[in-house]
Amino acid sequence: MQNVFESLPPAPLADLLLRGVCSRCILRFFNVRDTGLRHCISNSSELFFQLRPVLVRVMGEERLNGIQEKVNLEQVSKACKPDGGLPSQTMPRICIVCLGILQLYLQDNVHSADDTDTRKSPVISEVTKTVQKEGHKFDSFCLEISIPALTFVREHALWCYLNSRYSSEGLFKGADVNERIVPLKESLKHLLVRPLEQLWNASFDPNSTFRVALFYKHTNSSAELSFLDGLQGSCSKLGCQGKSKCNNVSKATIGATRENLEYGESLSFVQRSLPSIPLHKFSDHFPWPPPKLDAPCTMTTRCFCRALYVGGRYLKFSRNISQSPWMIDDERKGKSSVQEIIGEKVLLLFKADGYKFHAAGREDIDVRMLGNGRPFLLEITNARVIPTQSELTQVEASLNIIKGEWSR
């Protein structure tokens, strides 16, 4: 893996390491995919000292020391202790770009050569515990990852710095970082998918009904993204065409967007807006390169099955069964309902959280449903087991056996 870093341009490599960019984010910014990503030393300080002899040989000790001194001075000027003293000269422990997502949650030396030893990884351990607790059975899975919008801002800030510093050397050209680097989500999935496939004996499938969700949040998000308030009414910043559109973006709208910057459309809002902000304006609102962090992201996990559907037709011979539960003044009308008779049996088969009963029309409680039957659909919520067609046929047979019980 060290050979990959030795092949990178030495000056920006040393610069990034000294500023506390983790090794995996360095590869992302050099648009390096896949190669040894799982086996990187994530600690930038350790990797720097391993590569120092190579950097000295290529750059010369004087130039390398100059970069190190410049970075240390910048970090001292940006971060003083509350008591007025100076911070330590050690390099940042938490990656200033991914907020620790690719670094602290994916510890070094976790994977063996064949990627089978995954038990030490905090992410994989946490996700596996969640899956085991929920009791899902599956042969495929899909990862859903939600990251803070702050990562986009910090990526943009670092790209602005690299562009201004090294573009004359033919590096880091272009205004839109999204088109130039490997996305954070893509890197994280690459780190997790293969070990999880082997651990769970299941295949990764983007269309799988079984979903594993990872939610990352950072306490600094609101504070560091407060500059978005300054976007109110600015065509150049929002990328709007025409003054009338900008006038529609109220301060309340921007504030509401910032409150929900962790998920959904707001992420796209930030990602789309950043390239349209002129560099001199962006530097007024956010420092680049981005500053050190005191704490990493927090992570929560969740697993669930997408809605599954079971369809069929029902016949109703009784005049004392409603289509759905019928309550008047907390008093039940009728013996039961078609919804309950069918739904409860299917619910047990799927070991699901619940279900919804949908029918093509309805009939009154005292009206029978004969002929070819009425089409219905059961929407199964968070099923833990997906039964075979044979098992569904057995449930169908058991429902038909009891029809005489409700025929009066």
Image (cartoon, helix red, strand yellow):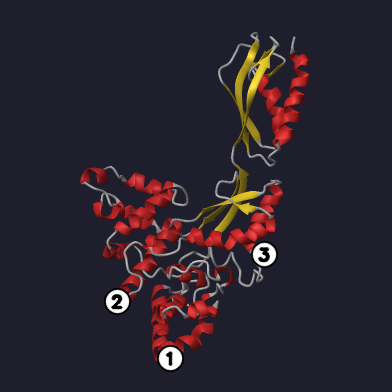
Q: Kindly report which numbered mark, 2 or 1, lies closer to the viewer in this rendering.
A: 2
Residue corresponding to mark 1? 61
In terms of depth relative to the viewer, which is nearer, 141 or 60?
141
Residue 91: x, y in percent? 49, 77
Under circle 1, the secondary element is helix
Give amino acid for label 1: Glu
In terms of depth relative to the viewer, which is nearer, 28 or 155?
28
Tell me if 98 is positioned left or right of 228 in this view: right
- 195 is higher (above) or lower (below) than 260: below
Give amino acid for label 2: Ser
Question: Distance between the Cα atoms at labels 2 and 1?
Answer: 22 Å
Q: Kindly report which numbered mark, 1 or 3, lies closer to the viewer in this rendering.
A: 3
- 324 is higher (above) or lower (below) than 163: above
Image quadrant holding the N terminus, namely bottom right
Give amino acid for label 3: Thr
Under circle 3, the secondary element is loop
Question: Distance between the Cα atoms at labels 3 and 2?
Answer: 43 Å
In terms of depth relative to the viewer, which is nearer, 119 or 373?
373
- 386 is higher (above) or lower (below) than 177: above
Residue corresponding to mark 2? 168
Residue corresponding to mark 3? 118
Q: Which numbered disc, 3 or 2, marks the residue that appears first in the sequence? A: 3
- 137 is higher (above) or lower (below) than 196: above
Q: Is residue 297 visible?
A: no
Q: Residues within 10 Å of mark 2 (few under 14, many from 20)?
A: few
Q: Residues within 10 Å of mark 1 (few under 14, many from 20)?
A: few
Q: Is residue 28 visible?
A: yes
Q: Which numbered disc, 2 or 1, marks the residue that appears first in the sequence? A: 1
Are discs 2 and 1 less than 8 Å apart at CB? no
